[in-house]
Image (cartoon, helix red, strand yellow):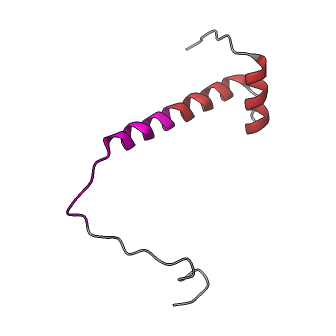
Amino acid sequence: MRTTLNIEDKLIDKASKLTGVKEKTSLVRLGLEALISRESSRRLAKLGGTEKRLRTIRRRRSGDRLHGSR
């Protein structure tokens, strides 16, 4: 779908420099994908649910298995 957008040159330039993406269409697509991802994460976090029957997950300490110690 073709759409005409009015976006400040400074904003496009900054996004291009930060991402290395030069094509404006790609910049807009990546920006929209990032926005969708961020907002989806926020909505999920807002649900704030818990699973009371979930078993505690055993966590490794920072040195375990990373450097061969056990």
Tag count: 0
Q: Locate residue 50, reporting x and y percent.
A: 27, 53
Farthest residue in the bottom direction?
Answer: 70
Q: Is residue 9 magenta?
A: no
Q: Residue at x 49, y 32 (%)?
A: 36
- Whether residue 15 sits left or right of residue 57 in the image: it is right
Give the x, y percent position of residue 38. 50, 37
Assign the N terminus to one quadrant of the image: top right
Reply above or below: 8 against 13: above
Task: Report whether 25 appears left or right of 39.
Answer: right
Query: In terms of image quadrants, where is residue 43?
Result: top left
23 or 66: nearer the viewer: 66
Q: Residue at (64%, 25%) from the top-left corner?
A: 28
Quarter-of-image position of residue 16:
top right
Q: Residue at x 61, y 30 (%)?
A: 31
Direction from residue 46 to residue 26 in the image, left or right: right
Query: Farthest residue in the left direction?
Result: 53
Q: Position of residue 42 (x, y in %)?
A: 43, 38
Give the image location of residue 6, x and y in percent. Answer: 67, 10
Q: Residue 9 sits in which quadrant?
A: top right
Q: In this view of the protein, which residue sits in the foreground, 49 or 65?
A: 49
Q: Which residues are magenta?
A: 36-54
Magenta: main secondary structure equals helix
Q: Is residue 45 above or below residue 35?
A: below
Based on the picture, tell me whether residue 51 belongs to the magenta stretch.
Answer: yes
Identify the residue shown where x is 61% and y is 84%.
67
Closer to the camera in the image, 4 or 61:
61
Judged left or right of residue 27, residue 14 is right
